[in-house]
């Protein structure tokens, strides 16, 4: 699934969707069935109406369409949120099918192949592309990355539970998968279970309906490492929370590693039982912010290396500057530009062309673009000073400092030049803005509290 | 043309060829049977442009010649004639007069030169098959042929000649039937062809219980010679999918079932299977099989039969018709059902080289 075919570029979004669909299917069918019919399927294209899958030969299409159609469609619906058709293309030309060596009947009666008696689906649902190696570390996620590394090296011995949270598309799932991979790499037999909390809830409901609760509980409590994504979806689901509470305890008491991810800190998850909140906060809570421009550049460079695509630094910088909210969007933009280049015989698109290609992404970014005035307003409110003070000449620290913070944020979040920012702050010199920016940056690296405040404001402004 | 033939012989000849003719034809001449009289025999030929049949019958030919006559009408006439000699004369404009005792019929026909020529088989591969074996193989596989016209490659049976073996396969995506026959042929003659459903149906009618028959395989045509009858058909163009992929290569539990008992039980229980889900549940416990079906608001059915089963308790559901079809076609007293788990296909086997893969249904 990680191979790239020269003839047909594999779309990043198609891969993502297929990996989610695969995960759903894996849980629904027997191991042999999954291996036989879905393991060798690759996703090559995804658009609004269809998902195109590449299958080894026509019997795959026939058998999947005849027997797993509805399953595939509902898994696809689950992954994409809307109904799409599935199309098939073949990996080999029809002629080569005829020459496929026909194994004699005796092979059928020979000893069974690999032990499919693997009762624990360890490592299922882990995207092979999400590893620690492919994760770009920047100041925005260094701490979380280190925590995950520690957990992966010594599961159950360092931070338990580990609670990661961040906004959308910043790498939570990537890190969780990376933890899973590293643990399995060190110990093939490790029982690593990766699921989303929604999957947990659905399975729980199914188990109740089918009366297989014991089997369900056994499955989860047998895990040595439990990785749960998007735990915020447990909000409001009382029975699931209760079940999870028991699962959590069973694992925790047995020193089994638990890693959770969410889009907000435990205390901010509404309708979550307090006993769960306290348990989530028990271990280490780590946050990730949107990457700064340097990290974004690094991510783009790494990604283009992986994709074996050469794009000139201007293009990389352009993308890094303009797409700032989340990494997923950034990678998607890169994908588009790269695909364009590869479909045009390696000709790199001009800036105008890129603007056109990424029109929707850039529009989305622009929509969330903050104005200097918004920043001033927010910061003033937060530090409890007047908006007018932002532009005033008053020097006392309790006013000057917030002003500096506002200048820093203006530099970070808007595309205004230093002079423009200076103008907006009461006709100040561009050098003043630069100085303020540096000051605040230095203070952030030393002061945890300030870092949190700035990040809070940052997030608030970008919402 | 003028000839005399026994009524029974004439009827037999017509009945051999009339099935190939479709009720709705594109060309009027395709509704006709071509009759050629020469050298003490009559030749009857029909075709629908994909499949054609020709056979001969003994007759007393007074004047050789040929014509074509509407086969259905002719057959129904001849059926109503008493046993005896039928005298047929065809004059000028292809109008045939039939005389049998005091009975007289006149039928308008079409000229024989308008009739599509029967394909010649020159450069082709030849295989000799035993009729009873082929008949048996057809019985064991033809019910699994796909009727979905969009999957035209599956609208027929695969004849795979390889390694001194003829493997016949039919599948519709939900179940697959496979039979192996031992056939002698040189390696240079190895070939895979797909014989279309209509031809298979005709072939099944023609093939007898004794003796041998010949199968000719050309580029995109196939011919079967059974006695003096020749059945010719276009082949299905395309490559048959890799059916081996479908056959599970592990077995977890094997059940031995009494075929007729099992079939009857499934049939009874299936009377209460809902139209929507149309499945019967098989619950295997030690040496016992309970078959069950139910339709909400209508009722349920259950039947237990003794079986030879020593494995873990297993429950699996199947479409009852898919289950019964092979059972009806098998001659043995016992059959084996190989199972893996409730989500994996089951395989019905017998002692001789046959297998039937059947996909399970969801156990609700």
Image (cartoon, coloured by chain):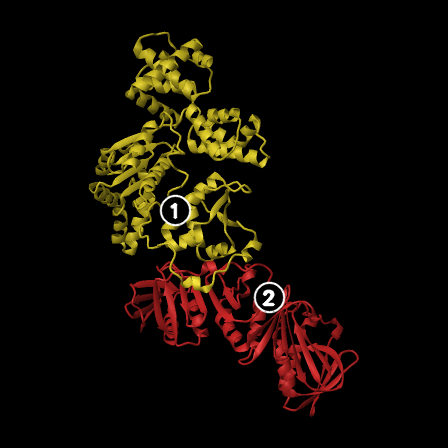
Based on the displayed image, in which of its 4 quarters is residue B50 positioned? bottom right
Neighbour tally class for label 2: few under 14, some 14-19, many 20 plus, Cα within 10 Å: some
Q: Is residue A289 above or below residue A181?
A: above
* Chain letter behind tag 1: A
Single out the mark in the foreground, 1 or 2: 2
In this rendering, would A393 be left or right of A363? left
- Disc 1 secondary structure class: helix
Locate residue A191, reporting x and y percent: 29, 45
Image point (50%, 75%), residue name: B136
Compared with A279, B178 (above or below) is below
Q: CA distance from mark 1 to mark 2?
A: 46 Å
Which residue is disc 2 drawn over? B189
Closer-to-camera residue (A287/A8): A8
Q: Position of residue A204 (x, y in %)?
A: 29, 49
B187 versus B81 height, above or below: above
Q: Quadrant of the C terminus of chain B?
A: bottom left
Identify the disc placed on residue A23.
Answer: 1
Residue A441's place in the image compared with A42, above or below, is: above
Q: Which chain is red?
A: B
Q: Residue at 51% x, 65% y: name it.
A: B170
Q: Chain of mark 2?
A: B
x and y percent of residue A292 in the render?
41, 24
Using the rendered image of the protein, determine whether residue B157 is visible from the camera's viewpoint: no
Instruction: Indicate which disc residue A285 carries.
Output: none
Indicate the secondary structure of the residue bearing disc 2: helix
Query: Which quarter of the image is occupied by the N terminus of chain B?
Result: bottom right
Q: In the rendering, at what x and y percent does residue A288 appear?
A: 34, 29
Q: In the depicted view, which residue is nearer to us: B349 or A318? A: B349
Residue B147 in view here: yes
Numbered-mark total: 2
Q: Name chain A's colour.
A: yellow
């Amino acid at each position: 699934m990680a191979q790239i075919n020269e003839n047909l570029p594999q779309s990043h979004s198609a891969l993502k969707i297929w990996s989610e669909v695969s995960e759903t299917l894996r849980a629904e069918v027997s191991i042999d069935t999954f291996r036989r019919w879905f393991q060798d399927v690759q996703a090559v294209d995804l658009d609004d109406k269809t998902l195109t899958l590449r299958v080894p030969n026509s019997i795959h299409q026939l058998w999947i369409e005849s027997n797993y159609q509805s399953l595939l469609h509902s898994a696809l619906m689950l992954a994409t949120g809307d109904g799409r058709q599935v199309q098939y293309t073949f990996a080999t030309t029809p002629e080569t099918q005829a020459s496929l060596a026909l194994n004699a009947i005796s092979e059928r009666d020979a000893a069974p192949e690999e032990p499919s008696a693997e009762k624990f689906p360890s490592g299922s649902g882990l995207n092979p592309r999400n590893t620690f190696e492919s994760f770009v570390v920047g100041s925005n996620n260094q701490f979380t990355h280190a925590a995950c590394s520690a957990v992966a090296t010594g599961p159950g011995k360092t931070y338990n539970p580990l609670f990661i949270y961040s906004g959308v598309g910043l790498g939570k799932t990537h890190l969780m998968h990376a933890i899973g991979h590293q643990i399995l790499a060190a110990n093939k037999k490790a029982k690593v279970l990766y699921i989303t909390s929604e999957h947990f809830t659905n399975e729980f409901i199914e188990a109740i309906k089918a009366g297989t609760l014991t089997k369900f509980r056994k499955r989860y409590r047998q895990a040595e490492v439990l990785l749960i994504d998007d735990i915020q979806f447990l909000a409001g689901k009382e029975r699931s929370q209760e079940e999870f509470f028991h699962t959590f305890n069973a694992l925790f008491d047995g020193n089994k590693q638990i890693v959770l991810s969410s889009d907000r800190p435990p205390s901010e998850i509404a309708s979550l039982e307090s006993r769960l909140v306290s348990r989530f906060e028990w271990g280490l809570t780590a946050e990730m912010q949107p990457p700064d421009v340097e990290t974004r550049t690094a991510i783009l460079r790494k990604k283009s290396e992986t994709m074996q695509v050469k794009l000139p630094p201007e293009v990389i910088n352009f993308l890094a500057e303009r797409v700032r909210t989340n990494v997923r969007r950034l990678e998607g933009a890169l994908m588009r530009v790269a695909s364009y280049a590869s479909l045009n015989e390696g000709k790199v698109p001009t800036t105008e062309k890129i603007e056109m290609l990424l029109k929707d992404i850039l529009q989305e970014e622009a929509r969330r673009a903050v104005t200097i005035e918004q920043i001033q307003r927010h910061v003033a409110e937060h530090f409890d000073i007047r908006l007018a003070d932002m532009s005033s000449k008053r020097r006392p620290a309790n006013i000057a400092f917030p002003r500096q913070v506002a200048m820093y944020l203006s530099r970070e979040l808007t595309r205004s030049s230093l002079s423009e920012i200076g103008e907006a702050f009461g006709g100040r010199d561009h050098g003043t803005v630069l100085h303020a920016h540096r000051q605040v940056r230095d203070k952030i690296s030393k002061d945890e509290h300030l870092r949190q405040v700035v990040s809070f404001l940052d997030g608030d402004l970008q919402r | 043309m003028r000839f005399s033939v026994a009524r029974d012989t004439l009827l037999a000849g017509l009945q051999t060829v009339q099935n190939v003719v479709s009720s709705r034809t594109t060309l009027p001449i395709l509704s006709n049977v071509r009759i050629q009289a020469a050298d003490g025999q009559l030749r009857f030929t029909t075709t629908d442009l994909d499949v054609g049949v020709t056979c001969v019958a003994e007759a007393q030919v007074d004047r050789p010649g040929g014509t074509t006559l509407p086969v259905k009408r002719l057959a129904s006439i001849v059926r109503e004639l008493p046993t005896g000699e039928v005298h047929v004369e065809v004059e000028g404009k292809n109008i045939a007069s039939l005389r049998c005792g005091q009975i007289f019929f006149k039928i308008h026909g079409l000229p024989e030169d308008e009739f599509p020529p029967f394909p010649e088989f020159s450069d082709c591969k030849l295989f000799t098959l035993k009729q009873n074996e082929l008949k048996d193989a057809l019985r064991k596989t033809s019910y699994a042929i796909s009727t979905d016209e969009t999957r035209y490659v599956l609208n027929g049976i695969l004849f795979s000649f390889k390694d001194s073996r003829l493997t016949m396969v039919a599948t519709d995506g939900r179940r697959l039937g496979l039979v192996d026959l031992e056939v002698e042929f040189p390696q240079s003659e190895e070939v895979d062809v797909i014989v279309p459903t209509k031809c298979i149906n005709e072939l099944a009618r023609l093939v007898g219980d004794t003796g041998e028959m010949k199968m000719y395989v050309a580029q995109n045509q196939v011919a079967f010679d059974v006695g003096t009858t020749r059945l010719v058909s276009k082949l299905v163009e395309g490559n048959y999918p890799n059916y081996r992929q479908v056959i599970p290569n592990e077995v977890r539990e094997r059940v031995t079932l009494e075929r007729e008992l099992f079939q009857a039980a499934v049939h009874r229980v299936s009377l209460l299977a809902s139209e929507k889900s149309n499945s019967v549940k098989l619950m295997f416990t030690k040496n016992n099989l309970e078959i069950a079906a139910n339709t909400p608001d209508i009722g349920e059915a259950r039947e237990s039969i003794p079986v030879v089963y020593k494995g873990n308790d297993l429950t699996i559901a199947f479409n009852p018709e898919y289950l019964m079809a092979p059972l009806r076609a098998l001659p043995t007293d016992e059959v084996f059902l190989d199972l893996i788990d409730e989500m994996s296909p089951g395989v019905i086997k017998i002692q001789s080289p046959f297998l039937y893969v059947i996909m399970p249904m969801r156990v609700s």
